[in-house]
Image (cartoon, rainbow, N blue to C red):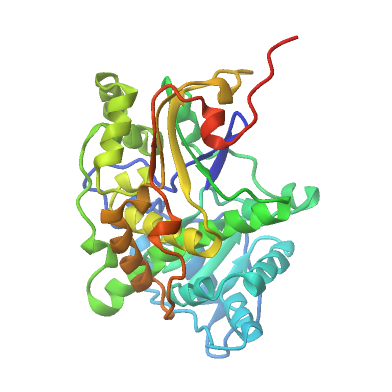
Amino acid sequence: MKFQVMGIVACLALLPACGHKKRKKDILHAPDVLLVETPLSLAGTSPASRDDAAFNRCMTGNADPDVLAGCNLPYVEVPSIPREDQVESILGSTLISHDWQKERFRSFLLSTRPEIISMLSCVKGVAISSDIRPSFYYSPSGGIYLDAGYFAATTEESGTVSTNPDSREQNFDQIDLLFFTVDTVKPKTAEEARYLDLEGLLAHELAHACDFKADAVNGRHLSDDLPETPENAVYQLAQWLYFGNGSAKAKLSQYTPEEIGKSYEESPIVDIYGYGNRYEHLAMIVQNHLAFEFDGNNRVDLLTDNPKEKQNLRDFPIYWGMTGKFCQPDLFAKGRDITKRAVPMAFDFQRTIADCPTVVHPAGTAVYQVLGLPPSRPAS
């Protein structure tokens, strides 16, 4: 869910190009015909009562979406304890494209937070494949589809993963502004970085799954309680960057960077991803609050010039910046409430709003000051 931009992490939403009246499956980046081209195999032991061929067919989607909707797979059963039994149950509903993915996923599941494990009870299956990019949740199958690149830890493993870029990356190159997000928690090792990225990815996709399971069980999405997205200046930026909406791109010239930042600052949407729809807004609320609770991670959103080749981003001016949009007092408590409702297990937040500052960064502040980077050295 993250791209590297000139050495700085630029987070992109797992969102499609869509208009206002797309179907839910389109909004969630699901293709019209769900087809995972690489053959997938089961990672664990199948439940005795399940037809594995039908499970694979429903999860990989070699059929019309209406047929997939008729599959009606059961939700994954996640025992309350012990963790080893939870993991084996999840692996029994996980399809993989390469054997190494099984052990990487198993290792993650053994070490991740119990909240993430409980959220896997909202899915009907998991697919990990070398040709999935970007990751997404697909409501007709009830499954989550994960980019294997999040799991690869060696050169050999990476060599089995598609090198095709996310199609939305090119949108960043076509405007003069760069909107990017960095985390305040910095991983100390490559292994920790992979873990945090994967935990964030799963929190996001599983939030979608729990949102749609709530609708299936109770007849109402959790995201139905979220506010309408205002079509303001930052909305136009989000629609171009993450949706490829050409008309939105044309409207961007009407706004200064400061106006875009101010519109984001004053809106009820906690993350620029959430400007797509309520489903993505909910997923980002849950992702942000779980990352904050788990690791104390806040987020810094910045608007700066779009760097060209070999230019050093940390020397660029900030037109607008903000730390902790989701920590704004009027949004924080509501975000906590919806996150608790999205996570199936009962849990109490230990961190408070006092641990989660909201800071607006003035125009003209150098990027390196906000990010805590050392200033660049003058040329000798």
Considering every residue shown, the one lying at the far front of the view is 354
Residue lying farthest top?
380
Q: Residue at x 69, y 63 (%)?
A: 101
Identify which residue is drawn at 58% across, 36% down: 372
Q: Where on the picture, by quarter, is residue 337?
A: bottom left
Q: Position of residue 74 (x, y in %)?
A: 43, 81
Q: Quadrant of residue 254?
A: top left
Eyeballing the image, is 241 above or below 42?
above
The image shows residue 70, relative to residue 27, as above or below, that is below
Name the quadrant containing residue 286: bottom left
Left or right of 283, for residue 80: right
Decide which of 356, 286 is in the foreground and name it. 356
Residue drawn at (49%, 56%), measured in percent from left and top? 35
Q: Is residue 27 left or right of residue 3?
A: left
Q: Nearer the viewer, residue 44 or 50?
A: 44
* Residue 13, horizontal then vertical, whole percent: 43, 46
> Is residue 223 visible in this depiction of the protein?
yes
Q: Position of residue 183 (x, y in %)?
A: 53, 46
Please determine whether, in this image, residue 66 is positioned above or below residue 253: below
Residue 380 higher or lower than 172, as above or below: above
> Residue 89, how many percent across, how many down?
59, 82
Q: Does residue 34 appear in the picture of this structure?
A: no
Q: Quadrant of the C terminus?
A: top right
How many marks are shown on the rendered structure? Answer: 0
Query: Nearest the camera: 336 or 156?
Result: 336
